[in-house]
Image (spheres, rainbow, N blue to C red):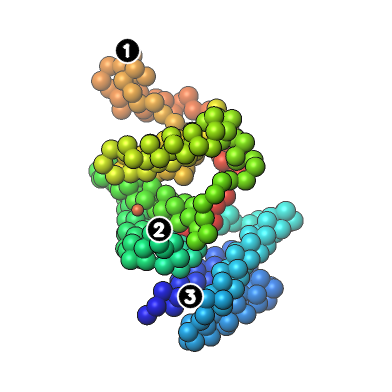
Amino acid sequence: MNSRHEYLEEVLKWKEDVLTVLKDEGVNENESIYLRIHDFSTQLSRLVEEDASNEVLSVVQGEVAALHEEVEQYFIERQSHGSTFINETYVQPGKHVLPPLPYEYNALEPYISEEIMKLHHQKHHQSYVDGLNKAEISLAQARKNNDFSLVKHWSRELAFHGSGHYLHTIFWNNMTPKGGGAPGRLLLREIEKYFGSFDLFKKHFSEAAKAVEGVGWAILVWSPRSRHLEILQSERHMILTQWDTIPLLALDVWEHAYYLQYKNNKASYVDNWWNTVNWKDVEERFLKARQLKWKPF
Ligand code: FE
């Protein structure tokens, strides 16, 4: 099986996921968005059977991008009508899927080989998706059974596999066959403002990446609080966080936060702390945070 064929197979799978989302959202099968996907899938199945050429493939890639935008637009419009309650599309516990690569496995050659891309995407990323699903399901089970004896273990798994899934999803899209060069004006200006120059930014980023202890990531981030870019390292990536998430409610359990009053009775501090929570603030953060929407996977 060649990689073009595999790509088409993945697009087919993606199309199925989109249909599931539409169905979950209660979209009527007579709506034009359904017909649009139906046409696309007939076209796709034919291509999977034939041996599609590169040109045909780039048409498919364009179609996938356009279709994705249409689906998004469809939901935005439905929401703006406001007459019907729309369930936000969300990934239910255990329902993460491997996103298709936005290009073929050999598309980044000679910089990254087809063999690496295949292994990295199909094996490594898939195992993060599987691990994240397992952790989410286990924690859902724990809530249901009111049994949190393994909460530490599953929280670790959630962090490790969740960060793995989210960061790889960012990583694949951060690359492209005809990449390189410099960013557009807005980002470039921001980079120059904070790092001094584009070259200094690249130097800093490269040095941070090379100096990551053991395994991990170099990550360019935006800080909504300080309103500037920053370069961070993530050793491994699972130190109990899930990258690509935004904190809404935080409880400080460092000793300095409770020891003078509660001594070693951390549990009692945690239980009492609920009486102080400002839910209005948490909700405001939630409303701001949910404005940021990535394609769900
Ligand atoms: Fe990786």
- Label 1: few (<14), some (14–19) or many (≥20) C-alpha neighbours in 10 Å: few
Circle 2 sits in a helix, a strand or a loop, which is it? Answer: loop
Q: State how far apart marks 2 and 3 are (Cα).
A: 23 Å
Circle 3 sits in a helix, a strand or a loop, which is it? Answer: helix
Q: Nearer the viewer, mark 3 or mark 1?
A: 3
Please state which amino acid type lies under the numbered disc 2: Tyr
Q: Nearer the viewer, mark 2 or mark 1?
A: 2
- Identify the residue under disc 1: 260
Residue 248 in sight: no
Whole-percent x, y for residue 188 in the image = 60, 39
Left or right of 86 on screen, residue 81: right
Please state which amino acid type lies under the numbered disc 3: Leu
| Residue at 28% in and 38% down | 213
Whole-percent x, y for residue 28 in the image = 65, 72
Q: Is residue 144 above or below residue 206?
A: below
Earlier in the chain: of badge 2 and badge 1, it is 2
Earlier in the chain: of badge 3 and badge 1, it is 3
Circle 1 sits in a helix, a strand or a loop, which is it? Answer: helix
Which quadrant: the N terminus?
Answer: bottom left
Left or right of 77 on screen, residue 280: left
Is the residue under label 3 in contact with that under label 2 (CB below 8 Å)? Answer: no
| Residue at 49% in and 65% down | 103
User: Which is more toward the observer, 268 or 97?
Assistant: 97
- Identify the residue under disc 3: 8
Please state which amino acid type lies under the numbered disc 1: Leu
Q: In the image, which disc is placed on residue 111?
A: 2
Residue 32 in which image quadrant: bottom right
Q: Nearer the viewer, mark 2 or mark 3?
A: 2
Q: In the image, which disc is placed on residue 84?
A: none
